[in-house]
Image (tube, rainbow, N blue to C red):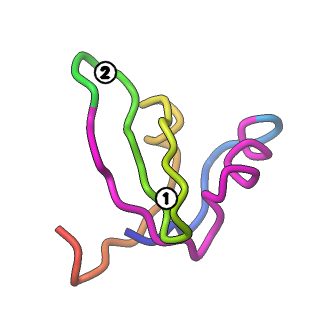
């Protein structure tokens, strides 16, 4: 998936940029925690990040053809 943007503002938007979840970054979902827990993501740059489900749902992505 490629990050297209995020429907968040303020500190959350700043945090996403700081951890590398900026527009154009390719991310892979490594794990989904049960019961509405966070998603464990890996960026193309190699960072691994746990993102709360509420924040992950606000990230706009484009699905790439070569990824599941």
Q: Is residue 37 above or below residue 60?
A: above
Q: Position of residue 63 (x, y in %)?
A: 31, 72
Q: CA distance from mark 2 to mark 1?
A: 19 Å
Q: Quadrant of residue 68?
A: bottom left
Is residue 52 toward the left or the right of residue 35 in the image? Answer: right
Ranked by sequence position, the earlier of labels 2 and 1 is 2
Magenta-span inclusion, residue 55: no
Residue at point 22%, 83% (across, down): 66
User: Residue 36 — which label?
Assistant: 2
User: Residue 31 — which label?
Assistant: none
Dot 1 crowding, Cα within 10 Å, few <14, some 14–19, many 20+? some
**Tag 1, which secondary structure?**
strand
Tell me the residue that label 1 is attached to: 60
Q: Is residue 4 above or below residue 56?
A: below
Out of 7 and 24, give the one closest to the viewer. 24
Residue interval drawn in magenta: 12-32
Q: Position of residue 29 (x, y in %)?
A: 32, 52
Is residue 32 toward the left or the right of residue 37 in the image? Answer: left
Task: Check the picture and name the quadrant holding the N terminus.
Answer: bottom left
Residue at point 44%, 41% (across, down): 57
Out of 46 and 34, give the one closest to the viewer. 46
**Tag 2, which secondary structure?**
loop
Q: Looking at the image, do the residues carrying marks 2 and 1 touch, with CB atoms under 8 Å apart?
A: no
Residue at point 48%, 29% (across, down): 52
Q: Residue furthest left?
A: 68
Magenta-span inclusion, residue 30: yes
Residue at point 31%, 21% (across, down): 36
Dot 2 crowding, Cα within 10 Å, few <14, some 14–19, many 20+? few
């Amino acid at each position: 998936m490629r990050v297209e943007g995020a429907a968040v503002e303020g500190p959350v938007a700043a945090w996403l940029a700081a951890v590398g979840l900026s527009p154009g970054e390719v991310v892979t979902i490594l794990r989904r925690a049960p019961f509405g827990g966070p998603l464990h993501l890996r960026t193309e740059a190699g960072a691994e990040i746990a993102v709360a489900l509420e924040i992950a749902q606000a990230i706009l992505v484009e699905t790439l053809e070569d990824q599941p």
